[in-house]
Every structure is written in C-alpha cells, then in structure tokens.
Image: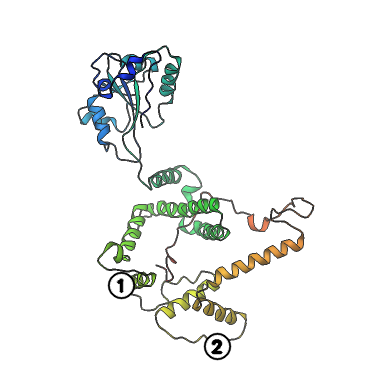
C-alpha cells in the first residue's frame, strides 16, 4: 500500500521516478517508509520487500527500544536508532533524497502520521514520498493467538477465573452448547457468531485450567494437535492415497479409521449417557444400525418406552428427534404466548412490556457467563460422532 503525497507547487517532483526517490540522487525530498509488523508473527520473520527497505535505508528509527523486532534487525546488521521524531524532524531527516524507515510500535504511530498529514495539507512544506510497508502479515486464525494470550492473563490475574475448575465450569458448557443450537435453529447470524465464540472460549478456558494440573497437565496446543491428527487420520481421501467421491464413502472411511483408533468392545462405548433422552435414544439406535445389529426394543409400558420407540423410528427415517421436538416445543411456546396476548417482541396486545418476562429463562444466566465456559466435544462431527 503506497500513500504518496506530491508537494504542492512543485511540479518537477511529479516527474521524478521511484528509483530517483529511493536513491536520492537529485537531492530531493526523500522518502519515509512506515514499517508495520504483526505481533502474532515471530520477530525477525519479515517480507523480502521489508528487508530490502531496511538494508537500503539511510536511517532506521524506532521509538520503542524494547520493540521485539529491534534485536533481530541489529543482528542482521541494521542500525536502529531509538528515537521518536516529530513530523517536521522526520521530513528534515529525509532532506537530500534520504530514505528513513520508521519501525511502527504495536500501538501504531498516529501522532507521527497525523503530523505528516498536517504538513502535507499545509502546502508549505516539500514532502517526502510516504510509504506504508507491512513487513509481516496475520495468517488465518491469527486472532486465536490473541484469545490464548488473553485467557492466560485472565487466569493469572482475575480473582474469579483463577479459582475455576473443570467441574465448576461444566454447567456453562451445557448452557453455551444449547445457546449455539438455538442460534443455528433461529438462523440469527450475529448470534451464531457470538455463540461460536462462547463455545470456543470453553475450549481455551478448560485448556488453560488443564495446564495447572499437577499430575496430567496439557495445553491448548496439545488439544489442537490432537484434533489435527484425528482429522488427518480420518480423512485418508484428503491427506492420503485413498479415494472417496460420495458422502457415504467418506463416512465409511471415518468409521473404519475410528474403529482402528478406539478398539471398542461395544458399540455403546463413547455414547454419553448424560445427553437428553431423545438424543441418547437416537444415538444408541444409530450405533446399533450402523453395526448391523438387529436389536428388538425392550418390552415395557409407559411414556418412556413410547418415546424410545418414536426416537428409534425417527432416527431410522433420518430425522433428528431432539431437533424435531424442539421445533414443536417452540411452536407450542408461540401458541401459549399468543393466547396470553403477547407479540414476538414480548409485548402484550396493548404494547406494554411486562415485568419479569423471560425471568425463568434468564435468571442467573449471566452470572459468570463470560468467564465460565466448558470445553467443546467432538461427539457429533458426523452421524456417528468422533
């Protein structure tokens, strides 16, 4: 990104080439290069263009002597002066066609850039060429490093977060998982993004807590490394020599590699019994059907056995009974609210907002919510989970 400002009233400057400006051969106004770097990229890993600018500069300035890039620049033979010039001082330093590189601090150089903009706008100063040169770039997922860093500081300094345990945060994981499902079913994109972040926080929070375990510690890198290895192993058609052209073939690969990993003695192993009843029934039915087991439903009377039969039938027909019941329950909720005279906005027929509306759903919901989250689970990545 180049931001070049031609000096007012100096037509001859517009005819100078970039090479002339860089070399400063005609005694011109010179060039200022504002070099920006990402703190998420290891110091010293700079673009080739950045190294060229640094080695070719007449001076390299940095107002922060503790800038993480400075030791690496000096190790590469580049002299870095710890200075914080004003805009006018920087313009003067470029006189005679000189090139000055300013290594921007993490907070940016707004004072300097605002000052340069003011000088350029005045029309009274012959300005050097101004160039913004990103020396390192964030890769996709770079903000995850920020999340890990922020969580690490919160765990160390926050009186509430520093005392949390896996067991104490478990309830928040369930809450956030349900809120994520609700955002998906409602089709609210903003809520979906927020709830995904809340679920992600569970993973980072629990991983940070796990680092403090005295007997079996692990970190977020261990968690990420495990899921990366799992995904690669279970996708031999992507990362290996096998082929898969249909979703059915992909599922076959997944189940085969999973069976090799788990070596379970029963298809019921790994099915969490704590999940909602309809989901549990459907999962057990799916496991039995996938394994080719023809297991009659247990004989019994009562609503529980009736619901079990309905859940098994729904799963066999490709219907998620839990989602189907939630959709029906939401319709029932809307009917109740309609009978009460409420609109979608929670107001009655006269337009009045009722006190306590939604108390049952919201009571205690935010207590510790933003800091207390649970780890995500990989059960359910496909029909048979992980």
Q: Which residue is mark 1?
A: 260
Vertical comparison of 38 with 295: above or below: above
Q: Is residue 126 visible?
A: yes
Vertical comparison of 361 with 128: above or below: below
- Identified at 56% across, 59% down, the residue is 182
Q: Is residue 217 visible?
A: no
Decide which of tag 2 and tag 1 comes sooner along the chain.
1
Q: Residue 373 at what x, y percent from top left?
A: 49, 54
Could you tell me how far apart the alpha carbons at marks 2 and 1 are, in whole angstroms? 34 Å
Q: Quadrant of residue 139?
A: top left
Labelled pair 2, 1 in contact (Cβ < 8 Å) = no
Q: Quadrant of residue 64?
A: top left
Colour mode of the rendering: rainbow
Residue at the farthest right position: 350
Which residue is nearer to you in this view: 7 or 325? 7
Q: Residue 88 at what x, y percent from top left?
A: 38, 15
Q: Quadrant of the N terminus?
A: top left
Which residue is nearer to you in this view: 28 or 330? 28
Crowding around mark 2 (Cα neighbors within 10 Å: few <14, some 14 to 19, many 20+) is: few
Q: Residue 49 at what x, y percent from top left?
A: 26, 33
- Identified at 69% across, 53% down, the residue is 345
Q: Which residue is mark 2?
A: 299
* Numbered-mark total: 2
Q: Quadrant of the C terminus?
A: bottom left
Q: Quadrant of residue 358?
A: bottom right
Element carrying mark 1: helix
């Amino acid at each position: 990104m180049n931001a070049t400002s031609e000096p007012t009233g100096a037509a001859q400057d517009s005819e100078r080439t970039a090479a002339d400006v860089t070399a400063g051969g005609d005694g011109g106004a010179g060039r200022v290069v504002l070099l920006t770097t990402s703190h998420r990229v290891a110091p010293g890993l700079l673009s080739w263009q950045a190294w060229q600018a640094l080695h070719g500069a007449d001076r390299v300035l940095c107002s922060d002597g503790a800038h993480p890039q400075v030791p690496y620049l000096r190790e590469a033979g580049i002299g870095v002066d710890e200075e914080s010039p004003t805009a006018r001082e920087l313009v003067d330093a470029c006189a005679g066609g000189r090139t000055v590189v300013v290594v921007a601090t993490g907070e940016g150089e707004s004072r300097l850039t605002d000052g340069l903009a003011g000088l350029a706008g005045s029309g009274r100063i012959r300005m050097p060429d101004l160039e913004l040169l990103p020396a390192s770039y964030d890769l996709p997922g770079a903000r995850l490093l920020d999340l890990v860093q922020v969580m690490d500081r919160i765990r160390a300094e926050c009186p509430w977060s520093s005392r949390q345990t896996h067991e104490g945060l478990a309830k928040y994981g369930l809450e956030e998982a349900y809120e994520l499902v609700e955002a998906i079913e409602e089709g609210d994109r903003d809520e979906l993004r927020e709830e995904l972040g809340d679920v992600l926080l569970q993973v980072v929070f629990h991983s940070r807590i796990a680092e403090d375990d005295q007997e079996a510690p692990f970190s977020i890198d261990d968690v990420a490394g495990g899921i990366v290895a799992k995904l690669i192993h279970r996708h031999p058609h992507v990362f290996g020599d096998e082929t898969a052209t249909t979703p059915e073939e992909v599922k076959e690969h997944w189940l085969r590699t999973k069976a090799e990993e788990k070596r379970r003695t029963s298809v019921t192993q790994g099915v969490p019994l704590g999940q909602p009843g309809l989901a549990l029934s459907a999962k057990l039915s799916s496991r039995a059907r996938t394994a080719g087991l023809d297991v009659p439903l247990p004989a019994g009377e009562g609503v529980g056995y009736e619901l079990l039969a309905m859940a098994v039938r729904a799963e066999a027909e490709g219907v998620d009974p839990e989602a189907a019941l939630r959709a029906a329950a939401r319709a029932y909720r809307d009917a109740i609210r309609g009978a009460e005279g409420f609109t979608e906005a929670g107001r009655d027929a006269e337009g009045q907002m009722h006190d306590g509306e939604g108390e049952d759903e919201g009571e205690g919901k935010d207590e510790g919510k933003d800091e207390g989250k649970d780890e995500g689970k990989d059960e359910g990545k496909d029909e048979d989970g992980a």
